[in-house]
Image (spheres, rainbow, N blue to C red):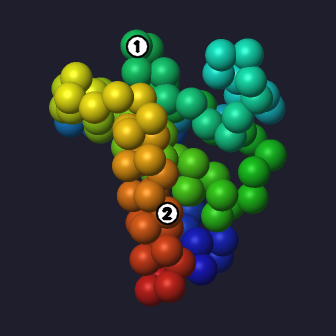
Amino acid sequence: MINKTFKKIPKKISVMGQTYQNKQRKDVVLDGQECEGVADVANKIIYIKKTLDPKTKWAVFFHEALHAVIFESAAWQNIDDSTEQIIVEKMSQFVVQILDSHF
């Protein structure tokens, strides 16, 4: 399971040649609403809520990293925000499911 197998989320990742910092915060807010994570693509920072359990942190990390991939690849120019959110959510759930059941 992710809780037992995986280490802490890396402090930095490379997304299509761009370095993103990963920061955990007590509160993560987007557009005035509290959330579990945010990809701040302008500043190349992924914020994750500190109080989440390990499995949820990894799911949020993958989710936000996928937003960064979409931004850095310029794919966001071809899809609307709600479609991006659906794609990112389903892909991150899929990755976590695979990791959870095979590692």
Residue 43, x across and y down, in percent: 44, 14
Relative image position of residue 1 (x, y in whole percent): 59, 80
Identify the residue position indicated by label 2 in the image.
93
Q: Which residue is mark 1?
A: 42
Residue 77 in picture, x, y percent from top left = 22, 23
Relative placement, left or right, of 37 versus 25 is left
Element marked by disc 2? helix
- Check disc 2: other Cα within 10 Å, few if <14, some if 14-19, many if 20+: some
**In this view, 58 is above or below 12:** below
Q: Residue at x 39, y 58 (%)?
A: 91
Whichever of labels 1 and 2 marks the residue nearer the N terminus, that label is 1
Label 1, residues with CA under 10 Å away: few <14, some 14-19, many ≥20: few
Q: Return the residue nearer the eye: 22 or 32.
A: 32
The residue at the point 54 percent across, 68 percent down is: 6
Q: Residue furthest bottom?
A: 102
- Please tell me whether residue 62 is drawn above or below residue 14 in the rendered image: below
Q: Label 1 vs label 2: CA separation? A: 25 Å
Q: Is residue 5 left or right of residue 63?
A: right
- Camera-side residue: 74 or 13? 74
Side of 1 where 45 appears, left or right: left
Query: Which amino acid is tagged 1?
Result: Ala
Q: Residue at the location (42% across, 66% down)?
A: 95
Nearest to the observer: residue 5 or residue 42: 42
Q: Nearer the viewer, residue 44 or 92?
A: 92
Nearer the observer: mark 1 or 2; the answer is 2
Residue 76 in the image: x percent, y percent? 27, 28
Q: Is residue 5 visible?
A: no
Residue 91 appears left or right of 51? left
Q: Are marks 1 and 2 in contact (CB under 8 Å)?
A: no
User: Relative to residue 53, is residue 101 depicted above or below?
Assistant: below
Residue shown at the point (80%, 46%) measured from the top left: 51
What secondary structure is marked by label 1? loop
